[in-house]
Image (spheres, rainbow, N blue to C red):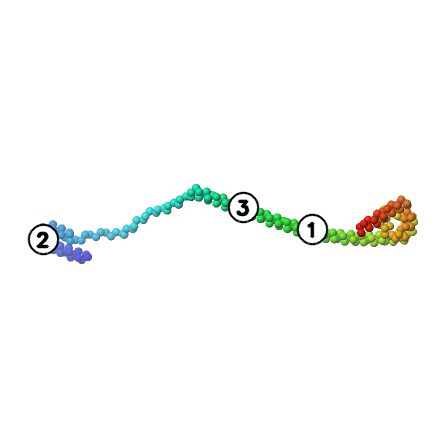
Amino acid sequence: MPLAFGVMALLAGAKLERMLRAGEPMLPMITAARAADPPPAAPATRAATPPVAPAVPPPAAPGPTAEQAAEQAAERAVLESLRARRAAIEAREAQAVARETMVAATERRLAQRVEELVALQRRLEALERERAAREEAGLRGLVKLYEGMRPRDAAVIFNELEMPVLVRIMDQMREAKAAPVMGAMLPERARSLTAELARLRAARISAQ
């Protein structure tokens, strides 16, 4: 392209020189040369970037109506009520479990206490049987002792002996041995002894 421009310039120069020599007017030639010259190229410009459209905010969602707001409030109230009811039920269940645990512990303690009392009662009964056996053995020894004494000597002791002890001894003595002793006792003491013996033997028959 520059070479063509150079050639055209040389031709135009030569023609211009000939015209000057021939005396031809220069204006038409200059005009023709200007017309022949290509228009200067426009300076290269950077490719224009497309304009950025401004961000348009999305349309705002329409707010809830009064009816929808009331429904939402009612739903929230129901949910809160259900939560409160569930919490109350869980609290009652926890209290019930705690009470059951306490009752079970109390029952175990009571059962253990009952077992201890039963064992203690058995020990006391065993001790009572042992004491009664020893007392019975001692009483039988006293009975044999008084049966071997002379009736008058035994009567002197029986007149001073406590009535409960005297009744038990006379109750176990053989009648053949008891009769002479009672005959030698003081009359009032003998009557009281007879009444107590009758009462004791009647109670024994009723218990049977």
Q: Would you say 161 lies left or right of 114 here? A: right
Q: Is residue 15 left or right of residue 198?
A: left
- Image spot of residue 58 (x, y percent): 37, 46
Which residue type does callout 3 highlight? Arg
The mark found on residue 19 in the picture is 2
**Residue lying at the far top of the rendered structure:** 66
User: In the rendering, at what x and y percent does residue 60 appear?
Assistant: 38, 45
Quadrant location, the N terminus? bottom left
- Viewer can see residue 153: no
Q: Earlier in the sequence, mark 1 or mark 3?
A: 3
Of mark 3 and mark 2, the one earlier in the sequence is: 2
Residue in the picture at 27% in, 52% down:
47
> How many neighbours does mark 2 have within 10 angstroms: few (below 14), some (14-19), or many (20 or more)?
some
Name which of mark 2 and mark 1 comes first in the sequence. 2
Residue 201 falls left or right of residue 70: right
Residue 113 is marked as 1
Q: Which mark is residue 53?
A: none
> Which residue was labeled with disc 3?
85
Q: Position of residue 116 (x, y in %)?
A: 71, 52
Q: Determine crowd level at label 3: few under 14, some 14-19, many 20+ residues with C-alpha closer than 10 A.
A: few
In front: mark 3 or mark 2? 3
Does the CB distance between marks 2 and 1 fall below 8 Å? no
Q: Residues within 10 Å of mark 1 (few under 14, many from 20)?
A: few
Q: Contact, CB < 8 Å: mark 3 with mark 2?
A: no
Q: Amino acid at mark 2?
A: Met
Dot 3: what SS?
A: helix
Is label 2 in a helix, a strand or a loop? Answer: helix
